Every structure is written in structure tokens, then in C-alpha cells.
Amino acid sequence: MTDPFADIIACRHAIRRHRDAKGDDRCWLDDYFVWALIPGSFPVPTDVPPMEEAMDMCRAYYKLRRADAADAQPANAVHDPAKWDADLETMDDAQLQAELARLHAAVRQHRDNACKPLTPDDDRALYAALPEQVTADFRLPPPHEFLGEGKAPNAGCPSFWRSHAGCKTRRHNLHKWGPCDDERV
């Protein structure tokens, strides 16, 4: 039997990591790490796709999931991370189970919406499941930096994909820049 408290914390942490990524740390691959919380989801990729396929995904992400300005913070947003999970302290087991089910439903909805191109609105709906109501910053670097070589070799999608070319393992950790050299990825 699992621990609902620990499962809630893990789920919230994954959603927060997705929400709090900024600039060219925002990536379509991040979706998989959130979806992995739901049994039967698409597996987290461990193979590097062909460069053109990967760049097609990056271009689609840039076109569909960016915004020109950060979302405004609502008046009720809680900015102190130490308070983000305070609601769990007073929940009994039934309430914890209900909260976990609610979070899983939000993740499942986000995952199931991936059958169409995802937009910031899909991400906003996912983030709304968090109690702190902190909003995301969907701004991305200019195209020549995000999709091109403007800040190569330390930033940009092409540089990221090339960083995995020299990996010593067949299973890649695509949540980090390469090269991957640890067989335990």
C-alpha cells in the first residue's frame, strides 16, 4: 500500500518543477515526467529521437506553448514555498486520498489533452491543481536562441540534442544535458 501523503508531495513536486521552469529550461519533454505519475502513461523517453524529429517537436513547442508575457499572479497566490503543502497537515486519510485523486485527475487531463497540440491553457489547468495558485512564466528566449545556435553550445534545442550524441549509454536522461555516461539512467 502506498503512502498518500508522500504520493501527493511527489505529484505536487513534479507539477511545480514543470511550472517553475523558465526560459529555455521549459521543454516538451517535461510533460513526460509529470505524466509518469499516472499508470499507463507514455513512458519517459530514454532514446534520443532523430534530430529533425526532435527539432519538429521543439518548433511546435515554441509555436504553441509560449507567451509574450508572464502570467499575472493572483492576489491569493502563496509565494512562500514553506506554506505550499500546509493544507496536508490537517487532512485525514480519506481527505489525503481525495487530494491525491484530484491531482491525478489533473495530470490525467493534461496527458489526455496531448492527443491535440497542448497550449499554455492546458498547462495553466494543470498548475491550478496546486494549492498555492502561483502562475507560470511561459516566455521563451527568441527563436534564434531557443531553436537555433544563438547561445550554442550552452543553450538551444540543437545544442541540447547534440549534447547527447556522445553518450556512453543507450538509455538517455533527457531531463538533463548530455553526455549521459551513467548506465543507471
Image (tube, rainbow, N blue to C red):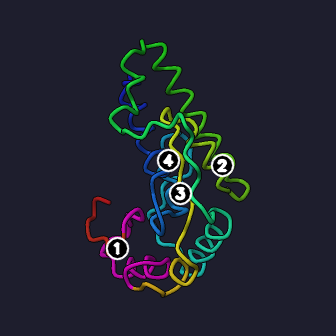
Labels 1 and 3: the sequence-earlier one? 3
Q: Residues within 10 Å of mark 4 (few under 14, many from 20)?
A: many
Identify whether 23 is placed above or below 30. Answer: below
Q: Nearer the viewer, mark 4 or mark 3?
A: 3
- Residue holding disc 4: 34
Mark 3 lies on a secondary structure that is: loop
Mark 4 or mark 3: which comes first in sequence? 4
Q: Which residues are magenta?
A: 153-176
Residue under label 3: 137
Q: Amino acid at mark 4?
A: Val
Asked if labels 3 and 2 touch by Cβ distance under 8 angstroms, the answer is: no
Q: Secondary structure at mark 4?
A: helix
In the shown orientation, is residue 178 left or right of residue 135?
left
Was residue 100 drawn as part of the magenta stretch in this picture? no
Neighbour tally class for label 3: few under 14, some 14-19, many 20 plus, Cα within 10 Å: some
Q: Is residue 182 above or below residue 150?
A: above
Marks 4 and 2, how far apart at CA? 13 Å
Q: Quadrant of residue 173?
A: bottom left
Q: Amino acid at mark 2?
A: Asp
Mark 1 and mark 4: Cα distance apart in space? 21 Å
Give the residue displayed 42% in from the left and 12% down from the top. 92
Q: Which residue is mark 2?
A: 122
Q: CA distance from mark 2 to mark 3?
A: 14 Å
- What's the mark number on residue 148? none
SS for callout 1: loop
